[in-house]
Amino acid sequence: MAIGDVYRLSATWDNAGGGTEQVNVFHFRQDTDLIFDTPEEDLSQRFIDEVVPSYRALVSSFLAIQNIGVRTLGVPAFGQDFPQTGMNGLLVAATILPLQVAAIVTWRTPFIGRRYRGRTYLPTATEAESNGTAWSNAYLTAMAAFADDVLGMGTPSIDHAEWTLVVGTDLVTPKPTVTTYTVQPVQGIIRRRRPGSGS
């Protein structure tokens, strides 16, 4: 594959017994030469090294990252899965929020319109981070740290290629580059989230 190609990275969370799977999907464009042998290895390893620590800080310890998957956008899609162990969320409050409640990060590009924006509905947090129907200030700060780390994957690194976050809409080519984000202070509701359904 080549500089300029876009890949889909999925992070799959679940509990040890299964049945509460939640999936986040991100789209990244390769902007420099690879350091690892393959784009799948390079992208997944940079995500694990630089994003997963702040990502885990937003999620209940009831869940853990089970897999990081990287795929091309072509048909058929090619790629690789990277199963994970010991990647539990770091929020240890006893009571988790309902599965349909989610913190939301909105990703923005320089362009106007829904097709030029993206959203990440984060996996389940705990009641300790909740302030009524809003998020605590500490949790909003942690959300911003996560978003900064995601965008930081597009900066120079001696250990990995540069991977720039883009909005993976099927309606726009080339994929628009994400330049800013907003952490939503009010809790979002995912109407159809249920065990076995991702975000």
Image (tube, rainbow, N blue to C red):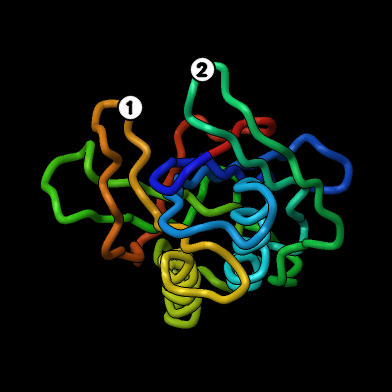
| Residue 179 shown left or right of residue 85 in the figure | left
Q: Position of residue 109 (x, y in %)?
A: 22, 54
Q: CA distance from mark 1 to mark 2?
A: 13 Å
What type is the residue that disc 1 sits on? Answer: Asp
Q: Position of residue 90 (x, y in %)?
A: 71, 71
**Secondary structure under the numbered disc 1 in the rendered image:** loop
Residue 195's image quarter? Answer: top right
Left or right for 128, reference 80: left
Residue 184: x percent and y percent?
Answer: 34, 62
Q: Residues within 10 Å of mark 1 (few under 14, many from 20)?
A: few
Is label 1 or label 2 in front?
2
Q: Position of residue 111 (x, y in %)?
A: 13, 49
Q: Which residue is mark 1?
A: 170
- Height in image: 171 above or below 105? above
Q: Earlier in the sequence, mark 1 or mark 2?
A: 2
Name the foreground residue: 100 vs 57.
Answer: 57
Task: Count the labels in the image.
Answer: 2
Q: CB under 8 Å between callouts 1 and 2?
A: no
Under mark 2, the amino acid is Val
Residue at x-position 69% and y-position 62%: 60
Residue at 64% across / 65% down in the picture? 52
Q: Badge 2 is on which residue?
A: 75
